[in-house]
Amino acid sequence: MRRHHLFLVGLSVAVIGCSRDAPVSPNVQTPVEEGGARRVTYTVGTVTALQNAIKNALPGDVILVQPGTYTGVKSTSGYSNAYFFSGKSGTSTAKIILKSQDPANPAILQGSTTASGYVFYLTGDNWEVRDLIFRTASKGIMLDNANWNLLTNLEVSNIGEEGVHFRDGSSNNVIENSNVHHTGVVTDDYGEAIYVGSDNGKWATYVKETDDNIVRNNILGPDVTAEHVDIKEGASRTILEYNTFHGSGITGANSADSFVDAKGNNSIIRYNTGYREGDANVVDAFQVHAPVSGWGLNNDFHHNTVTLDTATPYVVNAPTGTAIVSANTRSPSGNMYKGHYTVY
């Protein structure tokens, strides 16, 4: 896992009385209140304490996970597909923070099989999830109707399908400084590292507007079997920037044959670096598609740098939808743009 030196603001401890379904840990710092801001810190070291802390979290809670491996047990409640889950929300000024007690020795949250379940399922707003490892489930991190969340300095791997999924209207989220690899170990077709939105066939089930999400400064791959980032129709204004894509392991299953597939509108894909790494299934670096009318439009690709092994793959290929392109570079020299594109 790549390590990042992060500046973490010192957290004062604060709260005035909170009721919970069960005690989360004996290691609860004495609650106080400072300047109207609530802050209480819980240190957890068992699966039960960890799950109780996150499912009962209140705005301002800081949940410190001690070093170790935590194998979750799927819930028998409405979160029956999740090993760890929460529907609680923080606020813009009192976020819920879930993080490793020791970032240099991150805690591991995992499921028991890659065939089913989500390692972590969040349906709340205003969380910070940092310095943790998630592994061994069908899906890594799933956000449904979850907004204004920050995922940072994480590792997600050994996942049966997609690694991280912003779904069901989840908007204004950020994933940064993280490593997602070895996804699609059960189903190649659905092995995206990061998945934004939902296929139009699922719009009756999930809110399609997953807008204004940011994917920044991540290492994606190797052994991501589908796209590193799949931006679905219905998603608007996704930003992908400063990511590194390792193409080795892309399978071409279900037409997954590029680092990024942009099917939403007004995406910005900039300052990324991609390596084909001899994988012939990587047909192009970036693609644009319009599965339904009105989508796949005005996707902006600029200042990306890709190594594509041969002259054949295109940097941007937009057979449907539209792309605008500028200042992208490839090595070796070869095909640059194809389809519905405009150079600016």
Image (spheres, helix red, strand yellow):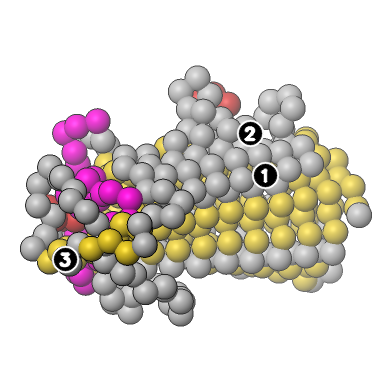
Q: Nearer the viewer, residue 174 or 295?
A: 174
Q: Are marks 2 and 1 in contact (CB under 8 Å)?
A: no
| Residue at image coords 50%, 67% | 177
Question: Which segment did they paint magenta?
Answer: 52-78
Q: What's the residue type where badge 1 is placed?
A: Arg
Q: Which residue occupies the extreme front position in the image?
A: 35
Checking the image for residue 237, the label placed there is: 1
Q: Amino acid at mark 2?
A: Glu
Mark yes or no: residue 39 visible.
Answer: yes
The one of 76 and 44 positioned closer to us in this rendering: 44
Which residue is more in the foreground, 254 or 239?
239
Which label was assigned to residue 319? none
Question: In percent of the image, x 65 and y 53: which residue is there?
Answer: 239
Quadrant showing the C terminus: bottom right
Badge 1 local density, few (<14 within 10 Å), some, or many (20+)? some
Q: Upstream in the sequence, badge 3 or badge 1? A: 3
Q: Amino acid at mark 3?
A: Thr
Mark 3 vs mark 2: in front: 3
Q: Residue at x 73, y 24 (%)?
A: 293
Give the image location of residue 333, x and y in percent: 84, 69
Q: Is residue 208 above or below residue 267?
A: above
Task: Indicate the position of residue 146 as horizontal and vertical percent values.
Answer: 44, 41
Q: Are marks 3 and 2 in contact (CB under 8 Å)?
A: no
Residue farthest along the top direction in this orientation: 204
